[in-house]
Every structure is written in structure tokens, then in C-alpha cells.
Amino acid sequence: MNSTAPPAALSLDLDNQWTYLRSHGRQAWKEYPSYLNLAVPRILEFFRARKMAITFFIVGRDADQDAHREVLAQIANDGHEAGNHTYGHEPDFNILGPGRIAEEIARAEIAIERATGQCPAGFRGPAYKLSQAALEILQKRGYRYDATTFPTYLTPLAGAYQRFTSSPAARDGARRGSLFDGLRDGARPLAPYRWELAEGSLLEVPVTTMPVLRLPIHLTYLNFLAGFSTRLARSYFLFALRLCRATGVGPSLLLHATDFLGCDDVSGLGFLPGMKRQSVEKIELLDKIIADYRRFFTVLPLGQFAAAVESAGGLPLVTPRFTPAGPRGGKP
């Protein structure tokens, strides 16, 4: 690790098998299939070997299951940070009413603290979904940072891909992403900033996309590119890192559990980018990507990265603006 390099963040969304099946309209999700007891030990071993700590955003429903308690406790035991990824990983989290949002956040807190011994100080909404109501609730509950925003102009394209790969029922029920949504998402800041809220402010650490071009650089996208060429995927990532250094952006790189799993581990997820590749291929790519990341930056868990950017000061205040949507889910 290059300890003299500027700070950067590394986090992992611990989305479980059932969350992907539900978002693509597969009825098998209702049985809550899980790969956590396979994926988490593999992930922990990967970072243990590299003497690294990262942030895991954990879904509360999974933390509530006795079958997952031991493996989730090991996340904290290995020195990683536990973050809140809501209780139910609701695909339309951003249009829930404030009461439902508060419940999703609070129930997850309780379950995650029970499983890991850590009360989360950081939050990431499912599928990059966020609202002003969620920000206000996080600020009131004393969260240190949010890490949800994903500044890319490809939001409508990503939505179209998901509808194309989903069941007819999921397509019919999906909330269509508009061009306006994409323009608004893409125009958000890449570097950390503070949301200006009614009763204070809250630090935002965006999921980094490529400076200038605003194209994704997270590992799932790199695995998609690696399906064409691993050299292309790595060259693309290196170009993004150089742009981050040139523009002064301290990146926040996102992983998913599926970046450590392949078609040899889990069946039925072939609709996800990279899930037609073997796990050994994906981990070989990940090993190179993480090594490259550490050559350019001092890589930290999100909580430590948040502390570093706050201590540096000079963070701009940003007024929350989200596409209007009527609240769903009761409890105004």
C-alpha cells in the first residue's frame, strides 16, 4: 500500500441472492435463498491476506437470520466496518413514505448491531435510491455519512437493461427511469460534499464514476467488460484512476458479493453482469484491480475516509433535489 498517496474508500454491498431474484421478478426470491455463508468467508479471506479493512453494507433482514449471525459477526471481528443497507432492500426505497423509511433504517440498525456488535454510522440505499426524507431521517438519527449517490448519465440505460432481463411481472411493476433522472444523477458532484438539511447537514460520499465521462467503474461493471477482455477491463480502470488523480477526486470504489462468486458457485443469476464467468477468473481480476487501486491511493473503509475528508475541510453544501415521486408504503 502506498501510504503517502491521497485517501480513497472501499466498500462492499452485501446484497444477497434473494435481493437480485426479487429485483428481476424471479418468484424464488420468496424463499430467501442465500449465498452469504459461501461468499462472506471468501471475501474475508481475500482482505485478510492483503491486511485490508473495508466497509460492508449489510441488509438487516439477513442480519436477523440465525443462520447468518456467525459469519456476519466475523466481519467485525476482522476489523471491518458495518454499514446500514436498509432492512428489506426495497427496490423503490426512494418513494417510500417517511414512516416506512424510518422503519427500514431503524430495524436494520438493530439487526446489524445484534449480529456484528457495531451500530452503523454509515448508510447506503438499495440500488442507489435516495430521497430527501431519507437524508433527514439519517441526520436526525446521528449518521455520520451517506454513500448512496451514483453520479452517472447511464441511469435510464441501466433501468432499460434491468427491464430487459427481468420477468414480465417485474417489467410491468418497474418504475421507469426517465432521461431527466439520468441528467440529474449525472450532474451530481463526484467528490464528497455535505447535504444542506433543515436541521443541519450530512456528509455524502458518492460512489465514484469516471471523472468527466461519468461512466461506472465499480467491480460489477469491470466484470462486464472482462467478459470481452480482461485487459480492456483493467486498462479502463487504470484510466479512471489516472483521471481521479488528475482531477483531485478521492474515489470511493464499490464491490458486491457477486464479484467474488461465479457461475460455478451460484445458479440462476446469469442475468447479472459477470455471473456467467468462473469465480477464479473474477478473483484474479479483482486481485489486480485492488493492487492497482492501492498503488494510486491509500485505501480506507468508508468511515475512515469520511473522517479524512471532513478533517481536510472545505466541503461544499448541496441542496437536496430529487425527482418528485408520490410516497408509497403508508405512514406519511
Image: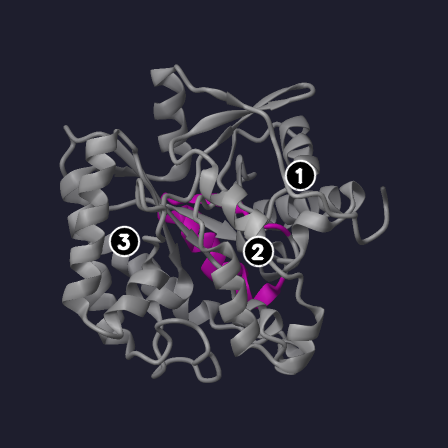
- Left/right placement of residue 213 relative to residue 6 reads right
Observer able to see residue 244: yes
Q: Nearer the viewer, residue 17 or 159?
A: 159
Q: Residue 91 at what x, y percent from top left?
A: 63, 60
Tag in front: 1 or 2: 1
Number of numbered markers: 3
Q: Nearer the viewer, residue 198 or 4?
A: 198
Which amino acid type is marked by label 3?
Answer: Phe
Magenta segment includes 2: no
- Left/right placement of residue 232 relative to residue 94 reads left
Tag in front: 3 or 2: 2
Q: Residues within 10 Å of mark 3 (few under 14, many from 20)?
A: some
Magenta segment includes 74: yes
The CA span between labels 3 and 2 is: 21 Å
Q: Secondary structure at mark 3?
A: helix
Q: State which region is magenta.
A: 65-86
Which label is found at residue 134? 1
Which label is found at residue 310? none
Q: Residue 21 at what x, y percent from top left?
A: 57, 75
Tag in front: 3 or 1: 1
The CA span between labels 1 and 2 is: 16 Å
Q: Secondary structure at mark 2?
A: loop
First in sequence: mark 3 vs mark 2: 3
Which amino acid type is marked by label 2?
Answer: Val
Residue highlighted by disc 2: 59
Is label 3 in contact with label 1 (beta carbons under 8 Å)? no
Observer able to see residue 117: no
Q: Residues within 10 Å of mark 1 (few under 14, many from 20)?
A: many
Which label is found at residue 47? 3
